[in-house]
Image (cartoon, coloured by chain):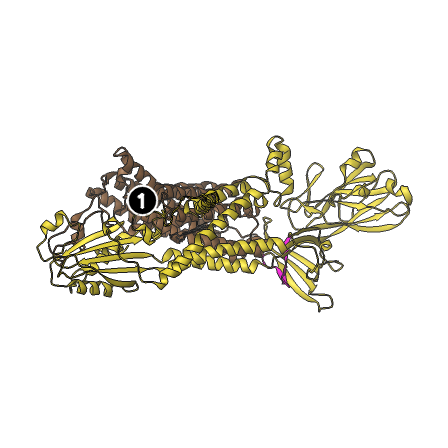
Amino acid sequence: MAIDTALATLSDQLFGAAAASYTAALICAAVEFSSARTRKVQVNERELVAAGVLTVDGTSSGRPVIPTAQPIGHVAKAEKAPWGERFGRVATVVTVVGFLIHVGSIVARGMAAGRMPLGNMYEFTSLICATVVGAWLFIKLRQKSLPIGVFVLVPVIVLMFIAGAILHTEAAELQPALNSYWKWIHVSTVSLSSGILMFSGIASVLYIARNRYERKGSTGKVGGKLPELATLDRIAYRTAIFGFPVYTFAVITGALWAEVAWGRYWGWDPKEICAFVTWVLYAGYLHARATAGWRGSKAAWISVVGLISIIFNLFVLNMVIAGLHSYAGLN
Amino acid sequence: MSRRDDTHLRSDTLEPGSAEPGYTKPGATGTVIAFLRNVWRQLTSMRIALMLLFLLALASLPGALLPQWNLNQAKTAQYIIDHPGLGPLLDRLGFFEVFASPWYAAIYLLLFISLIGCLAPRSWEFVGQIRSKPVSTPRNLARLPHHGRLVFTDERSPKQIADQVQKGLRGWRFTQREEPAAGDGMEPVITVSAEKGYWREVGNLVFHVSLLGILGAVAVGKMVGFEGSAIVIAGEQSEGICSGSPAAYDNFRPGLLVDGTNMAGFCLKVDDFEAGYTEAGTATNFIAHLSYTEEPGAPTQTYDLQVNEPLRLDGERVYLIGHGFSPIFKITFPNGEVRTYEQPFNVTDGNLTAEGAVKVVSPPGYTGDDVYLHQLALVGIFAPTADLGHGDLMTSIFPAPDKPGVAIQIYRGDLGLQNGSQSVFGIDQKQVDNGKLEKLNRDNMFIGDSMVVDGDGTVIEFVGYHQTVSLQTSYDPAQGYALFFAVTLLVGLMMSLTIKRRRVWFRIFPSSTGAGSAGADSSRNTSSSTVVEVGGLARTDQAGYGEEFTSLMKLAVVPTNQPSNASTGRP
Ligand code: HEM
């Protein structure tokens, strides 16, 4: 099948436009974040009453009763200057627009090449970035007061820059070794789960920063503006338990593909080793959360190591170490 | 001490740890047993499991960062030569064979022992939990990670509140209990214990057992499986290969228990080979047209072998893993005899430049020791689309055989084959160094060209080529089990990660008995207030239990007809 160059060019232009939108959103998100006030852990009594729970007479309009101890799992909102909030809203809208353009770029690329747009590093880096942004929007649209867009968009933009400037290759057909439906399932789920786990890793990095701030008192400027530990932990955990089974599935389909293509389902190829190491690290993360003394920031650190290993596996390994997988890379 | 992870929802985590029952001062054997028991308890603790997991990840890394014998022998050998200090040491320590090294095995065996030791008692306990009612309400709910207190002034009795709560606990297992009244003539305190998410435990168990299953399947595969590879010439006159013994293969890698008997007895021939390329030289398709018989005497069948589409025969699988060329030479010897020689060459680059050597072991017209003065070797390269761009040096500029050429260096003398095995793709350089094999003239040839060997007038003509196909046969009877356990692993994992394991307790004090620890609060209450204490416990999935717990507390609130306030909804 021939390559449709017009579509391929369109895809490249959309990719650039998406990156530009993210950059614009980044600026707005930066304003949003810097104008956010420092948050302290606090119990907001009025909110509990609004929840209709704690009143003296048991009706939702009665005299409030103060709970005996800890906050009942809600998050105190920081008061924000309204213009900061407005910038936040703009950031979200622009991110959504960028995301749609980005998806358009990926679809156009696939149509141009007449195959799934996952044939080389440029293409799957693009999908991973879109997944990270998608995961972020999924969370942000449900939880409005989460001014951490900066920390998501900066790595995404850096990755997209690398993808566009260094990894970019023209749309082309593939070697026969790559033509297998297992391959498509494998590579797409690897990209999706990597994107989700990367987002989870970002939340864990923020958790560590916030944890530091809380322990050292009010020194860090950034730490104080971050959401509370419980929020960050929840985001990191929820995305991890979604990403991890998808990643597991991706590794299994990778083994199925290897059985079909190379004659063995597992051969400790460098790429397979790194996939295994990443998998073990995330298993360790989930384990740590069930281990006394390992919850909290230690678990968050494991998630960050997992993030590093994903990045290593996707980018460093493809460029540096030659294995059977290496032809999926640059050339 | 029986401290356990407090997330394990055991009853012993809710109360302060009590001294181990029946504790007596140990004697000598007692000390040993106590020591062993301690080691065992340590080994099966979550903390050690975590350490072993990290160790496993860490120990895998050299496998990716250092060359490995099983993947690339040449590179590994070169690495050891390049690092004369460290290389041999690392080699002895197994760093070039990480996944076969004893230390790697030690880590995963310990991990799996720990796993069994951890999960067996846990499963046992779980069976007990299913068969009994939800555990009774802990004395001090305020010590739980989630807790709260409600005060009601309405007319409902504790029993009514308890029933109302139970009605709201859809999908939970619950039970109501009465606690003795605080004083004479008072109503008893009513508690509701509820828990849910038992399937999470099942999923967790399935997941961990599947890990064991996969390990077992991998181990069996390594024991009884094998891999063999061979280069087969394509074309009408193709000899093909007959499996059935390791000798059929150029390279045979048996499992530990494979003795070469009982191999499937299929025979196959490559009738034709096709390859398609884009203009840029990227391959678009490879097809090897096979004809084969499944066993001696069986009817001949055909199959189009392609990359990603192995031929599956009686448990063995045949793969197309590469292709190349074997040049054909017609040699006219000094005595006038003409013979044809053909030898597959070894592909060395993406444009299929191939290196190799044609060896004439018994040249006609010579007998006895004379043979060892007149053996010939044609050493060089084959290029499917030959280009002489760099002076006289031939390279291939395209993978399809559009303009095949060979660059051949002639040697004559003693090939040294009787000194032991040597590569089929080259000559023994020692024979050249010690003067037994003489280096003669070299030439580039295209099809139809010929050259005359210096000295004796032997004529060598490059008459053509055949395509060759590299085939690999793999046998792993356990791989289906590995897949089975991979699927159960995934299902178990999803169950265990999506199902929430939760406990909640309500303790409902009748009017004006007051909660024991009400303290300052009670002064604010009117005399006829009902106090409800609520406590909640989640496992590792505590993230998010906060909101859910808040809505659980709401179950005790006076029912209103207003739609309930959504601000506590789950995210
Ligand atoms: C072979 C290596 C192991 C791997 C890859 C592994 C992986 C995992 C994963 C991914 C989870 C999360 C699922 C969940 O939360 O239910 C988990 C949970 C768990 N694992 Fe393992 N595990 C391994 C070995 C062990 C060992 C040796 C033990 C015992 C010491 C153990 C005990 C547990 C327990 C108790 C949980 C449940 C945690 C909870 O939710 O409360 N695992 N494991």
Quadrant for the N terminus of chain B in the image: top left
Return the residue at label 1.
Answer: A149
Of all residues, the one furthest to the bottom in this rendering is B299
Residue B85: which quarter of the image? top right
Residue B91: which quarter of the image? top right
Residue A100 visible, this orientation: yes
**Residue at position x 65%, y 40% in the image:** B74
Looking at the image, residue B509 lies above or below residue B391:
below
- In the rendered view, does B341 fall on the left or right side of B252? right
Q: Residues within 10 Å of mark 1 (few under 14, many from 20)?
A: many
Q: Position of residue A167 (x, y in %)?
A: 48, 43
Which chain does the numbered disc 1 sit on?
A
Quadrant for the C terminus of chain B in the image: bottom left
Chain B drawing hue:
yellow
Q: Quick one: A147 or B508, which is closer to the camera?
A: B508
Question: Residue A213 lies in magenta, yes or no?
Answer: no
Q: Position of residue B30 (x, y in %)?
A: 46, 45
Question: Residue B318 lies in magenta, yes or no?
Answer: yes
Total marks shown come to 1
**Which residues fall within the magenta stretch?**
B308-323
Q: Quick one: B203 or B234, which is closer to the camera?
A: B203
Question: Which one of the lettered chains is coloured brown?
Answer: A
Name the magenta segment's main secondary structure. strand
- In the rendered view, does B129 fall on the left or right side of B533? right
Q: Position of residue B173 (x, y in %)?
A: 30, 63
Q: Position of residue A111 (x, y in %)?
A: 46, 56
Residue A188 visible, this orientation: no
- In the rendered view, does A134 fall on the left or right side of B302? left
Q: Amino acid at mark 1?
A: Gly
Of all residues, the one furthest to the top in this rendering is B85
**Residue at position x 50%, y 47% in the image:** B110
Secondary structure found at label 1: helix
